[in-house]
């Protein structure tokens, strides 16, 4: 396996163990948190986390009306990755507010998860 970013490595390890990724969903169950990229102009990032606890930390201030919502890994890989990629939305793996976060193409994240699966 090639060298991967430590944040991504931890993210993959947790997701592989629990088979779930976590996003922040609004009260209606329709909307998900997406924010501006810190790296790329005119690009959105969907923060996702490998644990519910990490996601819950971010349910404050402007995201106080959001709750952690589980996305089964199989559903994430099958549906979410292609939609996010097609929309040009990056993934913020184990995103942390007010820090430089790892922003990745959803295809890269999916490939990393599948590559680990194959080992």
Image (tube, rainbow, N blue to C red):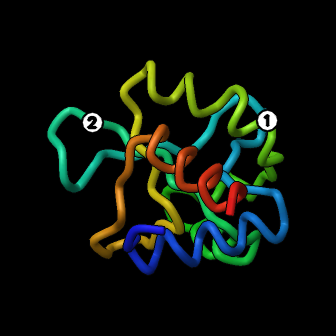
Seen at 53% across and 74% down, the residue is 9
Give the answer, above or below, for where 100 lies relative to 108. Answer: below
Q: Badge 2 is on which residue? A: 43
Please state which of residues 15 and 24 is positioned toward the viewer in this rendering: 15
29 lies above or below 63: above
> Viewer-nearest of labels 1 and 2?
1
Question: Do the CB atoms of the residues marked 1 and 2 lie less than 8 Å apart?
Answer: no
Residue 21 x/y as whole percent: 71, 56
Q: Is residue 77 left or right of residue 107?
A: right
- Left or right of 1 on screen, residue 60: right
Label 1 or label 2, whichever comes before in sequence order: 2
Q: Residue at x 47, y 66 (%)?
A: 95
Q: Position of residue 38 (x, y in %)?
A: 23, 55
Where the C terminus falls, by quadrant?
bottom right
Image coordinates for residue 10, horizontal then vertical, percent: 57, 78
Q: Quadrant of residue 44?
A: top left
**Residue 105: which quarter of the image?**
top left
Label 2 Cα neighbours within 10 Å, binned few <14 / some 14-19 / many ≥20: some
Numbered badge on residue 20: none
Residue depicted at x 75% and y 65%: 16
In the picture as drawn, the residue positioned furthest to the left comes out as 41
Mark number displayed over residue 75: 1
Q: Residue at x 62, y 67 (%)?
A: 12
Query: Which sits in the foreground, 3 or 32?
Result: 3
Q: Quadrant of residue 56?
A: bottom right
Q: Measured from the top left, where is residue 116 in percent x and y?
A: 64, 62
For the residue pair 71 and 64, the one nearer the viewer reads as: 71
Question: Quick check: 116 above or below 106?
Answer: below
Tell me if residue 119 comes above or below residue 46 in the rendering.
Answer: below
């Amino acid at each position: 396996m090639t060298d991967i970013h430590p944040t991504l490595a931890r993210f993959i390890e947790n997701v592989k163990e629990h088979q779930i990724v976590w996003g922040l969903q609004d009260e209606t169950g329709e909307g998900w948190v997406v924010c501006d990229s810190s790296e790329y102009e005119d690009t959105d990032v969907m923060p996702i986390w490998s644990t519910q606890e990490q996601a819950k930390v971010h349910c404050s201030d402007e995201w106080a009306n959001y709750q952690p919502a589980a996305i089964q890994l199989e559903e994430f890989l099958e549906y979410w990755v292609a939609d996010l990629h097609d929309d040009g939305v990056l993934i913020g793996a184990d995103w942390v507010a007010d820090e430089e976060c790892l922003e990745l193409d959803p295809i890269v994240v999916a490939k990393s998860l599948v590559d680990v699966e194959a080992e």
